[in-house]
């Protein structure tokens, strides 16, 4: 955890911004996989982590702004739990680490909130994402399931605070990125014909575990890089194919790294693989050069899109005017995702607050295919941390559908595009911080040229 002063200062800042009312923070609970005591790995709610830092099951908290109280609600371990799981510090000791002196039994939370509601204090809470949260809000606030309305002033305040990473948060993200880079290097070294995707997943995740970290999201380890979030691992790596890894580590405090790499299964890229890899990297570089305060991330996304469309035109896969093609969204057949997303305590940072607040500063989002997947569009500010992950994908289903609809046929040379089906996809991804006058990559980086990837493979 950071020092108690960090959490106290964050709560003080939130009180100042909101002015009055009660803020409820629901911590996460352990969830049984197939019966109660056989639990999924516990992951604390990130908003709770940001303001209270404690990664323990069964805690909730309240900031009572009008009475200037920060209270953690939870229950001390019973002897039965101690027999089962071993002893832990008392709740008072844990709360002290978060700078909180006021600790009360869980059973008192509802009556505390009942009193606040009688006094007509505004009640603030964020949008939650687990059924257990809905059920607890239903109980605490006497609303129907799904009937709780999150507080917009709270969302805006917390998005603003969490979007601007402090130096100690950046140092923590750097740690996650350093281990994330090792995960990718291990994969590049290990990718060989005959290895299974499951084995690759194990090799990658062993790196995170051996550093005392966990994965920040389910690993994507696939020979079908064109499937954006492929979570099956049943294929065998075959000569002539690409292997795409999208994986990241998360520190014990909950800060994420998120990188992607695409390497050949063989020792060298083929000419076609190199052409698409180099184009993907040209798009990355064009984007990264633009990163500085004040530049709308939408413009950065558009620049990466134009670079990809222009390169695909050189390869005969796209045609026509590149600017017009990108404005029309034709490039999205090959690059249907956004260029990147905020990253921090969540790999898609604060995604549960709503993309419009996190990535668009409240402005409406496009609903057009390709652009609708852009999670970040707003002007960049110092302290923002996000991924840069343009990709180039050849998707049989999408190509077939668009061709049958004659979609963007003035910009897509379908006969040529069909020759690339079966190629897969290329995505490389790094994590960036916006500084006062530009940007900085976080972590030591991973090989990002075909020569560097091949050299790393040759070392193994
Ligand atoms: N890197 C995985 C994701 O962004 O969802």
Image (cartoon, rainbow, N blue to C red):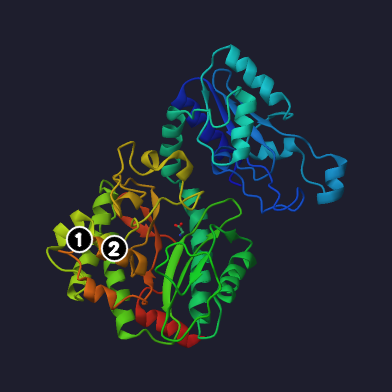
Residue at the extreme top? 119
Rendered view: 296 above or below 288 = above
Please tell me whether mark 1 sits on a helix, a strand or a loop. loop
Of 22 and 145, which appears nearest the observer?
145
Q: Where is residue 440 in the image (x, y as percent from the top left)?
A: 36, 58
Q: Where is residue 346 in the image (x, y as percent from the top left)?
A: 50, 49
Q: Residue at x 66, y 54 (%)?
A: 41
Please tell me whether mark 2 sits on a helix, a strand or a loop. helix
Of 454 and 196, which appears nearest the observer?
196
Horizontal side, residue 138 vs residue 162: left or right: right
Q: In which quarter of the image is residue 286?
A: bottom left
Count the numbered circles shown: 2
Q: Where is residue 418 in the image (x, y as percent from the top left)?
A: 28, 75
Residue 333: which numbered mark, if any?
2
Few, some or many residues within 10 Å of mark 2 (<14, 14–19, 20+): many
Q: Which residue is drawn at 41% across and 50% down?
A: 342
Is there CB contact under 8 Å for labels 1 and 2? yes
Residue at the extreme left? 321
> Is residue 392 visible to the viewer in this orientation of the structure?
yes
Horizontal side, residue 429 vs residue 3: left or right: left
Q: Which residue is drawn at 56% across and 73% down?
A: 234
Specify whether tag 2 is near ligand 1 (CB below 8 Å).
no
Residue at the extreme front? 404
Rendered view: 290 above or below 184 = above
> Is residue 435 visible to the viewer in this orientation of the structure?
no
């Amino acid at each position: 955890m950071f020092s108690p002063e960090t959490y106290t200062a964050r709560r003080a800042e939130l009180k100042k911004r909101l002015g009055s009312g009660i803020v409820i923070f629901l911590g996460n609970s352990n969830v049984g996989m197939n019966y109660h005591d056989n639990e999924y790995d516990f992951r604390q709610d990130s908003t709770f982590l940001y303001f209270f830092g404690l990664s323990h099951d069964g805690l909730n908290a309240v900031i009572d702004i009008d009475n200037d109280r920060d209270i953690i609600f939870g229950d001390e371990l019973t002897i039965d739990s101690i027999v089962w799981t071993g002893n832990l510090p008392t709740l008072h000791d844990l709360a002290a680490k978060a700078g909180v002196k006021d600790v009360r039994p869980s059973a008192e939370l509802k009556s505390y909130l009942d009193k606040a509601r009688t006094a007509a204090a505004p009640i603030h809470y964020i949008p939650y994402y687990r059924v257990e949260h809905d059920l607890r809000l239903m109980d605490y606030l006497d609303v129907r399931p799904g009937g709780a309305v999150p507080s917009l002033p709270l969302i805006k305040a917390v998005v603003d605070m969490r979007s601007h990473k402090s130096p100690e948060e950046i140092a923590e993200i750097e740690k996650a990125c350093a281990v994330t880079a090792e995960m990718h290097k291990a994969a590049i070294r290990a990718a060989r014909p005959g290895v299974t995707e499951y084995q690759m997943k194990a090799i990658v995740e062993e790196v995170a575990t051996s550093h005392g970290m966990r994965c920040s999201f389910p690993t994507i380890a696939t020979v079908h890089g064109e499937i954006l979030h492929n979570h099956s691992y049943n294929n065998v790596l075959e000569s002539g194919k690409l292997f795409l890894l999208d994986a990241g580590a998360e520190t014990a405090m909950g800060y994420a790294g998120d990188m992607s790499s695409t390497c050949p299964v063989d020792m060298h890229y083929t000419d076609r693989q190199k052409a698409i890899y180099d184009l993907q990297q040209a798009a990355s570089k064009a984007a990264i050069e633009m990163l500085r305060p004040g530049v709308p991330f939408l413009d950065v996304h558009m620049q990466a899109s134009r670079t990809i469309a222009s390169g695909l035109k050189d390869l005969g896969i796209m045609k026509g005017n590149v600017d017009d093609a990108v404005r029309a969204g034709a490039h999205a057949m090959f690059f249907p995702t956004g260029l990147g997303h905020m990253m921090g305590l969540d790999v898609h940072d604060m995604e549960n607050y709503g993309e419009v607040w996190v990535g668009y500063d409240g402005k409406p989002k496009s609903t057009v295919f390709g652009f609708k997947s852009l999670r970040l569009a707003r002007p960049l500010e110092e302290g923002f941390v996000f991924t840069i992950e343009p990709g180039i994908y050849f998707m049989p289903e999408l190509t077939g559908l668009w061709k049958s609809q004659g979609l963007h046929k003035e910009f897509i040379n379908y006969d040529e595009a069909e020759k690339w089906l079966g190629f897969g996809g290329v995505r490389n991804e790094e994590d960036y911080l916006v500084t006062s006058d530009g940007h900085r990559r976080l972590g030591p980086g991973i090989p990002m040229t075909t020569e560097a990837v091949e050299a790393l493979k040759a070392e193994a």
